[in-house]
Image (cartoon, rainbow, N blue to C red):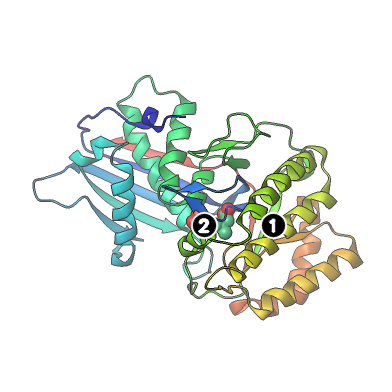
Amino acid sequence: MDESIFISKNFIPKEGRVVCESPSNIALIKYWGKYGLQFPINPSLSFTLSNCKTKTSLEYSPRLEGQGRFDFLYDGKIKKTFENKIEEFFERISPFCPYLENLFLKINSKNTFPHSSGIASSASAFCSLAFCIVSIEKRYSERMTEQFFFNKVSFIARLGSGSGSRSVSGPLMIWGENEFHSGSSNYFAVNYRHKIHQIFKNYQNTVLIIDDRIKISSSSDGHKKMTKHPFINDRKNQAKNNLKIILDAISMGDLQVFIKVVEEEAMTLHSLMMSSQPPTVLIKSKTLEVIELLKNFREKENVPICFTLDAGPNVHLLYPEKYKQEVIRFIKQKLVYYCQNHLFINDNVGLGTKLLDFKLI
Ligand code: PMV
């Protein structure tokens, strides 16, 4: 593919305001390691979530001489700590969205999940910002198809957060070129188009907040360390094989295989971190204790539940909707004591980013 297809014509938009909402996502096959400008070293697969989301409002107006590019507010208040990351994002996307040079943007973002819950919000934050930006472009590009719009949102979101490319749509998204899904790409994520067995409909994801502190090492550093990792080639092969196996399991409704692959991916992610130079350990002893209890519960009660992990200590539980009551009871009886402030968040699979409002002022 030639990424120049995403270079927009230049134009001078009038003033307006666009509001949208993007959910977070949870990877089943993990993206870990990147090259070039946010290209993944292996394909990944994720469930898009519903409740954990970022709402972004973007007000745009002609940029005055000497004026900066943007103001960033979190929940109505200026937030300086995010400015460098957003500035870098604008540097990366400006060749593809030249009209941004003519605009001043007032960005106001807010997460629906607790601010210090330890849940990574960069995926939903960058996807919602990308969706707002490309929505402006869509107004001025009469012939832009829905498919192109979604591809470009995902492409732009990727330049802010790799995993953010997968939050544009749902319920299952694939990012990274692979031979098992035609149309898959390193540039943007696509909807998984083949059969999804009924058992995965409205699949549940409960996040146990083991530790809500900011991570000691960013995922960006972790991705970079993969380029010189001694196991990089084995990891690429493993991710590819696991993708094939899990896609078959998802279409057949084979929960045993699904569970095996999801947990292997979570453990591999953290093993790769621990075996990188210098090593990073993000899980806590409580993470391992919860995993042990979960496995006992699965065996004893015959509930097809599994765990996965992001680049942090919190445990994501994944299970079919029909077991929800039983699982919540188990969490309240056994797991909640391992959670910081007894906090856990219930979520389920969803369909991706939504436009909430668009007004020309
Ligand atoms: O998108 P980033 O750079 O925050 O990386 C996310 C990496 C993992 O969450 C660990 C895995 C994934 O595929 O989402």
Q: Is residue 345 left or right of residue 157?
A: right
Residue topped by disc 2: 227
Q: Crowding at label 1, few (<14), some or many (≥20) Cα neighbours within 10 Å?
A: many
- Marks 2/1: CA–CA distance: 18 Å
- The amino acid at mark 1 is Glu
In percent of width and height, residue 176 lies at 56, 41
**Looking at the rendering, in which quadrant would you find the C terminus?**
top left
Q: Crowding at label 2, few (<14), some or many (≥20) Cα neighbours within 10 Å?
A: some
Residue topped by disc 1: 265
From this view, report whether residue 281 is shown above or below residue 227. Answer: below
Determine the residue positioned at 43% across, 35% down.
152
> Which residue is more in the foreground, 56 or 10?
10
In percent of width and height, residue 68 lies at 17, 52
Determine the residue positioned at 62% across, 37% down.
178
Mark yes or no: residue 329 visible: yes
In percent of width and height, residue 12 lies at 19, 32
State the SS at label 1: helix
State the SS at label 2: loop
In percent of width and height, residue 319 lies at 76, 55
